Image: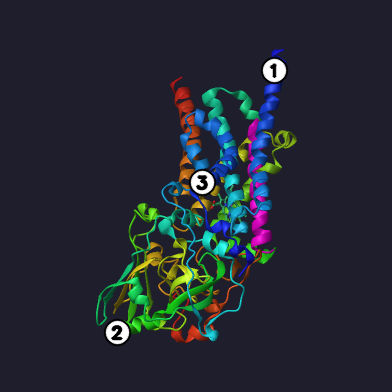
Amino acid sequence: MSKRSQQPSENEVTPESLYLRRREFLTRSASAGIGLGLGARLGFAALGSGLLAGCGPDEASAGRRAALPTRTLSTRPGPAELQTDEDPTSYEDATRYNNFYEFGTDKTDPARNAGSLRTEPWSVAIEGEVAKPGRVPLETLLAPHPLEERIYRLRCVEAWSMVIPWVGIPLGDVIARMQPTSKAKYVAFETLHDPQQMPGQRRGVLDWPYVEGLRIDEATHPLAILAVGMYGKVLPNQNGAPLRLVVPWKYGFKSIKSIVKIRLQESEPPTSWNQSAPREYGFYANVNPEVDHPRWSQARERRIGELRRRPTLPFNGYADQVAGLYAGMDLAKKY
Amino acid sequence: MRLESARARRRALRLATLLVGFAPAAGLVVAFLHDGLGANPVEKITHETGEWALRFLFLSLSVTPVRRLTGWRMLLQERRTLGLFAFFYASLHLAIYVGLDLGFAWSFLGEDILERPYITVGFATFLVLLALAATSTRAAARRLGRRWKTLHRAVYLAGIGAVVHFLWLVKADTREPLVYAGVLALLLGSRAFWALQRRSRSGNR
Ligand code: HEM
């Protein structure tokens, strides 16, 4: 872990400093204001909003900055063969550069707005093809499983990547406890839907709530985990607190955050980005340098903290473990 | 005396334009030095320079309508400078993309231009800005004569191209590029409106 991540100052951002930051922001965009003056005086209000639009989404005023968690978790290291020994991304970067549209579409929005999410109490609805469906408090769900640290690469579909030391439990163990019936072929997940707590949901950028899914053999693969923490501490809100999925061989959007429902079912569940743009995002979304996103290349990625791009690896470097799940499938079609 | 003050105002306006033009670049340099570009600095400066290119393009497109509405003729002298700032930021934008994003792998650029529609449009827009910047001198205007005006009408295409480039690159949240599209509609629409007015007036005669 880098030294930066141990600095406490960034962990205790007060509303006051948030306010100062905004002012700094306004000063910086003063130059836009000069251009604006000309237009606005003449009723070119739209020109004004065009210039301002770049200066920070208005969701910023809707949410609250989340204090970074201080509670540490006691963990044991996960299986060595599943871990990467690459340097983890700095804690600072991992908590200020997030895609979590529930809190705004800019990558700095979640850190700014996720303070309004209440993660306690939290419960998860267990539904569908299981022996005992019902709503389970998060503590009860976690109780039987020792927490493990898993250092994984994270590859976003937008061609950037990080290395995150997650804390979590194997999803397969949780599913086994649910006692799936023979009809359980897929696992469907759902994020909290509450525009009060999640200001980004007040706009229909995606069809809320966010939903994701896995085939059951993917879900029970030893690499797939439910995470409750990272960097030895409880998950920050902007990273998907209090419970999120991590499937490191798939693009980041598969790893659904702030989960309130897990449903086992016979049919392939709908997934949010696939519904939003089916040509661009498939159900499988395995990291694949050979299948480009229709609008950009997936051949290379920028590791956050590095300047130059590096090559992207098939299945994000986990091909040895997971390629077998897709034997005989045409991954250019099942993207 | 009056002449003096007109010249002073002209100078002041000139200076103001230059300050406004270089301020965003200076801001980026300061932010860079103070680690203020966030977790992904290359992405940040790509976005910032792209957006400033678009904003200066719009500012230069707004000179004519603003002058018409206010009668402030002096503004006209700044149109070229604003356009050149658009070209300046677009060049930085492209340089960052080719240098930092692609690591000067020119073959990637060729591939991107051919395969990624938003880059195809961005590149075409850049070529238009390049042509306009290269012919922006008085001498070039004199040499080209009437054709200069025709050529420089391509600035409308550049405006459309830049907005389409932006619209095609966002993932799901099209609000921001749509705001720019709205502004562009006003900028071009006002011209169309005045052109129609002119025509109907001369038709009545
Ligand atoms: C060869 C020419 C160009 C290339 C290769 C290029 C490339 C790019 C790239 C890679 C991005 C970021 C995409 C992303 O993050 O997903 C971008 C964004 C952008 N570009 Fe360009 N571009 C070019 C020309 C232009 C021109 C001429 C303009 C304007 C006059 C422009 C305006 C913008 C804007 C406004 C954005 C979006 C910024 C934001 O998201 O805030 N680009 N361009």
Magenta-highlighted stretch: main secondary structure?
helix
Host chain of mark 1: B
Which mark identifies residue B5? Answer: 1
Which mark identifies residue A179? Answer: 2
Q: Is mark 2 within 8 Å of ligand 1?
A: no
Which quadrant holds the N terminus of chain B?
A: top right
Q: Nearer the viewer, mark 3 or mark 2?
A: 3
The residue at the point 44 percent across, 85 percent down is A325
Please give the range of residues in magenta: B78-103
Can residue A195 be seen by looking at this rendering?
A: yes
**Secondary structure of residue under mark 1:** helix
Q: Picture coordinates of residue B195 (x, y %)?
A: 49, 30
Q: Is mark 3 within 8 Å of ligand 1?
A: no
Pointers 1 and 2 within a single chain: no
Which quadrant of the figure has residue A264?
Answer: bottom left
The residue at the point 63 percent across, 40 percent down is B151
Q: Is residue B90 above or below residue A286?
A: above
Which mark identifies residue B72? Answer: none
Q: Picture coordinates of residue A72 (x, y %)?
A: 49, 70
Crowding at mark 1 (Cα within 10 Å: few <14, some 14-19, many 20+): few
Q: Nearer the viewer, mark 1 or mark 3?
A: 3
Lateral position of residue B153 relative to residue A127, left or right: right
Q: Picture coordinates of residue B60 (x, y %)?
A: 59, 36
Residue toward you, B185 or A81: A81
Q: Is residue B18 above or below residue A175?
A: above
Lateral position of residue A87 relative to residue A232, left or right: right
- Residue at mark 3: A16
